[in-house]
Image (tube, helix red, strand yellow):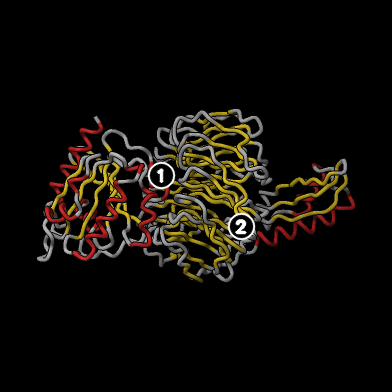
Amino acid sequence: MKLKRFLLRYYPPGIILEYEQGGLLKTKSIDLLDLRPETDTDLVVEEIARKEQLITSSKIDQVRKLVQRLQEKIGQKDEHHFYLFKVLRAHILPLTNVAFNKSGSSFITGSYDRTCKIWDTSSGEEMHTLEGHRNVVYAIAFNNPFGDKIITGSFDKTCKLWDVKEGKCYHTMRGHTAEIVCLNFNPASTLVATGSMDTTCKLWDVEKGVETVSLGGHTAEIISLSFSSSGSEIITGSFDHTVVLWDVRSGKRIQSLVGHKAEISSAQFNWDCSLIATGSMDKTCKLWDVGSGRCIGTLKGHEDEVLDVAFDYTGQMLLTASADGTARCYNAVTHNLVSKLEGHEGEISKITFNPQGTYVLTASADKTARLWDPETGNCKQVLEGHTDEIFSCAFNYEGNTIITGSKDNTCRIWR
Amino acid sequence: MGLLALLRKLKSSPDKELRILLLGLDNAGKTTLLKQLASEDVSHITPTQGFNIKSVQSSGFKLNVWDIGGQRRIRPYWKNYFENTDLLIYVIDSADRKRLEETGEELRELLEEEKLAGVPVMIFANKQDLVNACAAHEIAEGLNLNSIRDREWRIQPCSAISGEGVRDGIEWVIKTCNSKKK
């Protein structure tokens, strides 16, 4: 094994090692999830050198510099005030979902008007309209971090793979017998997973555009899915009240997470994939141990359905958003309530951290999106202007741009 | 009603729930009718650019009513909403004599849709409160409704603004769906 170079990853903090082994170029990451500005740098470097044989004594100085750079970055507490940059009369019918590419240079919007559009973030100009679906384009995703492909899932039961640069359709994947409502690329961008109202999840080969495996077993609609960071596992959340952990290669079920008393709304891994958080219409959020499949905590307190859950990038904090109009921030390790986010006048349907973990963004039926301090629960800003409810929202990786997609047919860029 | 609620409403409805599609030309009064059904204020209504959904309880049934915008350029997208429809409500502006032909044409096309085959249709001859409104029987003749043989249908004069006639129409809707679901 020979170390070729270091790459820095800011969110979540980590150092990526690019090395050669048997003539092949490989990478591995050293996660520094607990790193703080005040952490003793020397201790961290020592620990890394002890655990990682690729870090020889000649590399120590370089590693120290990288750790210091990360600490500086984490320590930056720039208060960002967002203002409305552009209103995009994006579609002729309501938007569904929105998503950024990794660099944030472009983003995509899906719509009831059966199209997906690619936008340039800095100018707000439309780059391509992806046409071809015969019904609502509901689920959309970039193949981040690469960002050269897009997958769109539609109520027309198909999903389409597109080229970002030319806006051309590579493949139309057929096989589902009902609406496709969730999807994503695996981290290596070799597979696409689609979840459908037909109760199955299918995996598709990106290169060939063919189905590789169908994950059957749920007894109701699949509405949420998520790959593990390694890409070897996937979880599916269903209206059948359960979440299933699957082995991607074999398509076999590893665990069924049973315990919620109503439909699942969202299922997410934390960064190191030791935990799964699930939100449910039973008004609770549950935390599960991935290894054993056991429920290790039930977060109660919401007075209505939990509609979304989200970890921060390090996996140490957890957010829940509810139809009761409030959101909550929990410590994902201790399960203690950190803060309540109160102020929306309608249900909160989407919630997310910025990659830095310093802001929470919520999208609500009250036509506003709001920014919150997760530590105190104080509302920092109300993003007003949409004339109908907001269905989706997203932060870019830098955390300095927000997009919101609404039932009012527009998309707004805030920076 | 976020995206998740939309997905839940996509599912085929259980016994005591009805999925009702509300269609018609722009300015026919669909949203006013929807708000009247939900006992909401009908004084400030703007053209629907997308859709509105309301769930209304009536006679032990939960009516999930989808009001879809009727402007010409978004009519081709009505198809998005056909799946699992239990009943179609078609709203006509009875005072807009110039567009009776156009509304008849749209209705005829809807009745030919495969996904709406056999779906009962309730036609509201709306805006009866206006003096120049056509009577329901005139509209029925003009649109040749008697030629509809492949489903149950009914025409009901009403005023969505005042609410007159709306209740009678909904009673028929529930009765018809009830006998179909059994």
Query: Around disc 1, counting alpha carbons within 10 Å, would you say few (fewer than 14), some (14 to 19), or many (20 or more)?
Result: some
Closer-to-camera residue (B84/A360): B84
Vertical order, A96 against A258 (above or below)? below
In the rendered structure, the answer to whether residue A277 lies left or right of residue B173 reads right
Closer-to-camera residue (B27/A245): B27
Asked which secondary structure carries label 1, the reply is: helix
Vertical order, A319 against B73 (above or below)? above
Distance between the alpha carbons at the discs numbered 2 and 1? 26 Å
Evaluate if marks 2 and 1 touch, with contact meaning CB atoms under 8 Å apart: no
Residue B101 image point, x, y percent:
24, 60
In the rendered structure, the answer to whether residue A98 lies left or right of residue B114 reads right
Quadrant of the rendered image containing residue A400: bottom right
Vertical order, B58 against A133 (above or below)? above
Residue A357 image point, x, y percent:
58, 55
Residue occupying image coordinates x 28% and y 55% = B105
Query: Around disc 2, counting alpha carbons within 10 Å, would you say few (fewer than 14), some (14 to 19), or many (20 or more)?
Result: many
Asked if residue A388 can be seen in this view, the reply is: yes
In the picture of the structure, the residue carrying the numbered disc 1 is B7
| Chain under numbered label 2 | A
Residue B32 image point, x, y percent:
22, 58
Vertical order, A283 against A352 (above or below)? above
In the picture of the structure, the residue carrying the numbered disc 2 is A101
Residue occupying image coordinates x 60% and y 28% = A252
Q: Amino acid at mark 2?
A: Asn
Asked which secondary structure carries label 2, the reply is: loop
| Chain under numbered label 1 | B
Asked if residue A272 can be seen in this view, the reply is: no
Q: Amino acid at mark 1?
A: Leu
Quadrant of the rendered image containing residue A409: bottom left
